Image: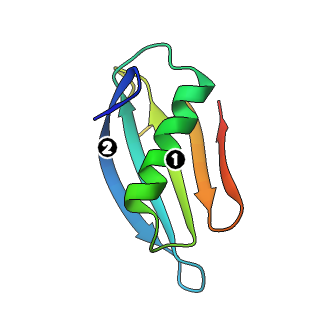
Amino acid sequence: MKSGEIAYEILSVRDFGIGMRRRNVKVQLLDYSPSRDQLMKITEIIWKEHGQDVEELTTVFYLPGMDPKSVAYAFGGCMKGKGCYVDI
């Protein structure tokens, strides 16, 4: 998939939570130097496409070559009624 100038691949989507439904999306970036704005755009696109049936969606970003079972490069997320964020 592409968001503006940055390509990415969704590695997994996992739902969890009982009282408050949440979704975790692991994202493999195909660019070594994404900007905060690019990560925010990807988070917003994934929220619109995959998060409308949950209260909160979290995106976990990995740079090319990073092990998705290890530490992430950045985190993003969106909550219903509260907007989106990205932390690098």
According to the picture, the residue beneath numbered tag 1 turns out to be 44
Q: How far separated are the C-alphas under marks 2 and 1?
A: 14 Å
Q: Quadrant of the N terminus?
A: top left
Q: Which amino acid type is marked by label 2?
A: Ile
Rendered position, 84 above or below 3? below
Query: SS of the residue at dot 2?
Result: strand
Compare marks 2 and 1 and give the one earlier in the sequence: 2
Circles 2, 1 touching at the beta carbon (< 8 Å): no
Where is residue 37? Give x, y as percent: 60, 28
Q: Quick check: 85 left or right of 64?
A: right
Query: SS of the residue at dot 1?
Result: helix
Q: Which amino acid type is marked by label 1?
A: Glu
Residue occupying the far right of the picture = 82
Residue occupying the far top of the picture = 33
Which image quadrant is residue 70 in? top left
Q: Would you say residue 22 is visible in this rendering? A: yes
Where is residue 17? Give x, y as percent: 53, 77
Q: Which mark is residue 10?
A: 2
Where is residue 53? Give x, y as percent: 44, 74
Where is residue 52? Give x, y as percent: 46, 68
Color encoding of the figure: rainbow
Q: Nearer the viewer, mark 2 or mark 1?
A: 1
Q: Nearer the viewer, residue 78 or 22?
A: 78
Q: Nearer the viewer, residue 5 or 27?
A: 5
Which residue corresponds to the image point at 39% horizontal and 60% vertical from the top-left?
50
Which residue corresponds to the image point at 72% horizontal and 61% vertical from the top-left?
82
